[in-house]
Amino acid sequence: MASAEALRRVALPGGFVDDAGRVHDEVEIAILTGAGEEAILSAPADMCAAALITTLLAHGVRRIGTLRRVTNASVRDLLVQDREFLLIRLRELTLGPDMWVRVQCPRAECAQSMEIKLRLDTLPVTKRPVMARYAAFDDAIEFRLPTGDDQEAIAAAGHDGADASRFMLERCLRHRDTRRAVDVGALDAATIGAIELQMQEAAPDVTPEMDAVCPDCRHAFVAEVDLPFLILTQLRAATRRLEEEVHVLAWNYHWAESDILAMSRPKRARYVRLIEEQLDRFSTV
């Protein structure tokens, strides 16, 4: 069980609608433990980002509104933007609020690479609370916002580009009267564009844009960052020490692996530091 200090309550920028139509907008999230880190380490190298986010959030999310049984399925049903928001909060809680990201000057004659510091706890978030799972586009069609389950389905089907967009719409649109799926191929380009715009305007915005100035050519630009990808990459890199820490703690304290994996990274690090300090003292005697 996570300690009170390791738990945080956050308000979703969108919200989760359960099968009964109830909207849940508060989530309780916990610092990532060794079990969550191990799940990253053991994940297949070709696991899609959406599935990896599901794995992480299933370990970190303790409660969604009044729903205290959080499963992979319930995490998949969260809106894409809510999942990205929770991933940012999970990274902040586990590794701290400061994060350095590398961007490149967009001027072709420069293309200088640079690092910019992000404060995850101050990133702007545009909240757009949902009122129901589906919203009306017109008298005939209604839509819902994409979820993690949709992203995983797209990845599993191998779609990208225009095919991915069409596949997503086919999953998110339905006829208002029959609730049957809409044949997206029968819609004209103007209608599809209007639907996509309305969906975009209805969705919360958690994508960071950073004002940057190139240190070489002094060109000012706005850098868009794929924060979920960077966070997943960083968390994967940060877990590489896990097995070493488990070995040190099990060897010295004779603790069970499951007990060690139940600890958070900071707690494990404190014990490992104590062992290292004691070994240093013994080596100087």
Image: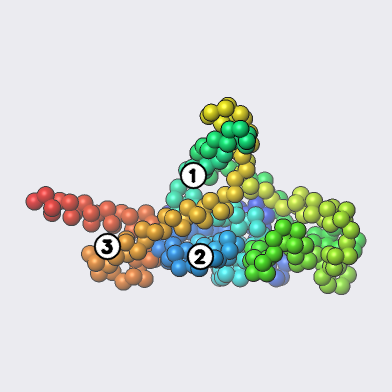
The numbered mark at residue 45 is: 2
Whether 144 is drawn above or below 280: the answer is below
The numbered mark at residue 165 is: none
Q: Where residue 187 sits: x, y (%)?
A: 88, 61
- Of residues 284 and 57, the one drawn nearer to the viewer in this rendering: 284
Element type at mark 2: loop
Q: Where residue 49 sits: x, y (%)?
A: 58, 60
- Residue indicated by mark 3: 248
Q: Where residue 19 sits: x, y (%)?
A: 70, 71
**Mark 1 against mark 2, which lies toward the viewer?**
2
How far separated are the C-alphas under marks 1 and 2?
24 Å
Question: Local crowd at mark 3 within 10 Å, few (<14), some, or many (≥20)?
Answer: some
Amino acid type at circle 2 is Ala
Q: Where residue 237 sits: x, y (%)?
A: 44, 55
Give the mark nearer the N terminus: 1 vs 2.
2
Q: Residue at x 84, y 57 (%)?
A: 192
Element type at mark 3: helix
- Of residues 25 and 248, the one drawn nearer to the viewer in this rendering: 248
